């Protein structure tokens, strides 16, 4: 299975989080449309079928997500 680049996943998760806040504040149709697009893209990028699973999968694939992951350490 192809995996999305961590930078792409981080961007999608950040956009989703921002749109979720905006939707809670005003519920605008444009915000909902954009949120639907991001939800779909996150699901495709992570090979999942719902947003909760997509967010878990995306966050798990980000650098530093796993305890033994040393990708955030510098030498």
Image: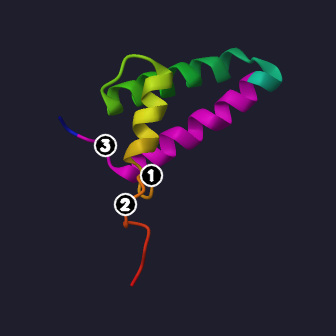
Q: Which residues are magenta?
A: 3-23
Q: Residue at x 58, y 18 (%)?
A: 33
- The disc label shown at residue 34, or none: none
- The disc label shown at residue 69, or none: 2
Q: Is residue 7 above or below residue 41?
A: below
Which residue is the extreme one toward the front? Answer: 67
Rendered-image quadrant of the C terminus: bottom left
Q: Residue at x 50, y 28 (%)?
A: 38
Q: Residue at x 67, y 28 (%)?
A: 20
**Marker count (numbered):** 3
Mark 1 — residue? 65
Residue 26: image x %, image y %?
81, 21
Earlier along the polypeptide chain: callout 2 or callout 3?
Answer: 3
Q: Residue 28 versus residue 69: which sits nearer the camera?
A: 69
In this view, the mark in front (3 or 1): 1
Mark 3 — residue? 4
Earlier along the polypeptide chain: callout 3 or callout 1?
Answer: 3
SS assignment at label 3: loop
Which residue is the extreme one toward the left? Answer: 1
SS assignment at label 1: loop
Tell me if 8 is positioned left or right of 22 in this view.
Answer: left
């Amino acid at each position: 299975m192809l995996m999305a680049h961590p930078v792409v996943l981080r961007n999608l998760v950040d956009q989703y989080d921002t749109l979720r806040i905006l939707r809670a504040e005003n519920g605008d149709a444009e915000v909902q449309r954009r949120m639907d697009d991001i939800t779909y893209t996150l699901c495709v990028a992570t090979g999942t079928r719902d947003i909760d699973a997509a967010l878990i999968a995306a966050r798990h694939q980000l650098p530093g997500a796993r305890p033994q992951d040393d990708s955030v350490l510098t030498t």
